[in-house]
Each structure stands twice: as structure tokens, then as C-alpha cells.
Amino acid sequence: MPLQRRLPKRGFKSMHATFKAEVRLSDLNNLAVGEVDILVLKQAGVLGVLARDVRVILSGEITKAVNLKGLKVSAGAKAAIEAAGGSVA
């Protein structure tokens, strides 16, 4: 029997998938702070411990002013945050 049939089959596991996370606008709206960065999101329990690349996406709505620092933001989410009086740095 050929070697490739005798060896166990293993799937593909991305090395970068565990470090990426997405945050919705509705999650930001539920936070009690005005300045938001990765550390604040981890302490609030919105993100996991291993998250490094965080992206804010347009899902839900935001009604209060939030200042984001060090986070990637989609174009729709940036427009919604700025319309609510917040800023993205």
C-alpha cells in the first residue's frame, strides 16, 4: 500500500485565525467607557485572551460617542461612530 494511504489524514489549521476578532457596534454601545482599545475590550469580556487583530464592523447601532484607539474599523462602522459623535484614531 502506498505511503500516502498509510499515513493518518490531517486537515489544515490556519495559524492566524485564532488571533483575529471582530467587534460589533452594538458591543461598543454596551460598554460603560468612552475610550476603547484592545485592553478595555478584553477586560469587558468582549474579546478572548488571544485576540490581537481586532476589527470593528457595522452590525447593530451605536448611540453614544466612543473614541477608538488602535483598532481597525470598517468604512460603515467609521461613518456610524462619527455620526454618533465619536472618533477613530
Image (cartoon, grey):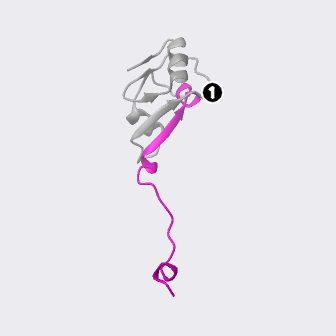
User: Which one is nearer the viewer's eye here, 5 or 69?
Assistant: 5
Total numbered badges shown on the rendered structure? 1
| Spot occupied by residue 35 in the image (x, y as percentages of width and height) | 41, 23
Where's the C terminus, which quadrant? top left
The answer to whether residue 6 is magenta is yes
| Spot occupied by residue 45 in the image (x, y as percentages of width and height) | 49, 40
| Spot occupied by residue 76 in the image (x, y as percentages of width and height) | 55, 22
At 50% from the left edge and 20% from the top edge, which residue is drawn?
78
Extreme-right residue of the structure: 60
At 41% from the left edge and 48% from the top edge, which residue is drawn?
50
At 51% from the left edge and 73% from the top edge, which residue is drawn?
9
Q: Amino acid at mark 1?
A: Gly
Which quadrant of the structure image shows residue 62?
Answer: top right
The answer to whether residue 50 is magenta is no
User: Which one is nearer the viewer's eye here, 55 or 33?
Assistant: 55
Q: Provide the residue designation for mark 1.
A: 60
Label 1 packing within 10 angstroms: few (<14), some (14-19), many (20+):
few
User: Which one is nearer the viewer's eye here, 53 or 30?
Assistant: 53
- Please state if 89 lies on the left or on the right of 11 as rendered: left
| Spot occupied by residue 5 in the image (x, y as percentages of width and height) | 52, 80
Indicate whether 18 appears above or below 37.
Answer: below
* Residue range of the region highlighted in magenta in the rendering: 1-29
Extreme-bottom residue of the structure: 1
At 61% from the left edge and 23% from the top edge, which residue is drawn?
61
